[in-house]
Amino acid sequence: MQTPIMPEPEPTGRAEAGEPDFITRHFCIDGRVQGVGFRWSMCYKAEKLKLTGWVRNRQDGSVEALAHGPRAEVDALTVWAHRGPPGAHVTLVRFDDRPPTP
């Protein structure tokens, strides 16, 4: 089951000069990341950063997530994902940026 981060914002079109560059990033996080509150902590961090997307546990023991928002905030979530919440032991974070949806 996916845990939503926040509802998707209404599309606003391309960023104007001085507006943030929005990106969508897909994550796969390995290590001791299930049973330690990783999903809920990632949702909390993403909400604080005003990002949208989802987080879910995978059958292989990893956590998968998708986050959308301003590049700087998505980058901040990426840094956080490398350490996770207390009790987690992250061994690998794989991520790739996805093309924006129309």
Image (tube, rainbow, N blue to C red):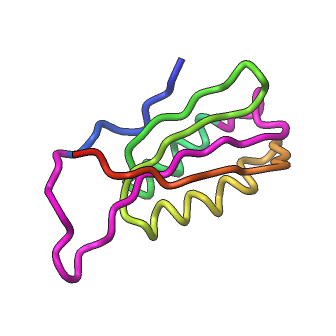
Observer-nearest of 97 and 6:
97
**x and y, in percent, of residue 36 in the image:** 76, 33
Quarter where residue 50 is shown: bottom left
Task: Give the residue displayed 64% in from the left and 63% down from the top.
Answer: 79
Looking at the image, residue 1 sits to the left or right of residue 86; the answer is left
Quarter where residue 70 is shown: bottom left
**x and y, in percent, of residue 55 in the image:** 54, 34
Say above or below: 34 vs 101: above
Is residue 32 in the magenta section? Answer: yes
Observer-nearest of 14 and 32:
14
Looking at the image, residue 98 sits to the left or right of residue 13; the answer is right
Tell me the quarter of the image containing the N terminus. top right
Looking at the image, residue 5 sits to the left or right of residue 96; the answer is left
Looking at the image, residue 101 sits to the left or right of residue 14; the answer is right
**x and y, in percent, of residue 68 in the image:** 39, 50
Task: Give the residue displayed 17% in from the left and 49% down from the top.
Answer: 11
Residues shaded magenta: 10-38
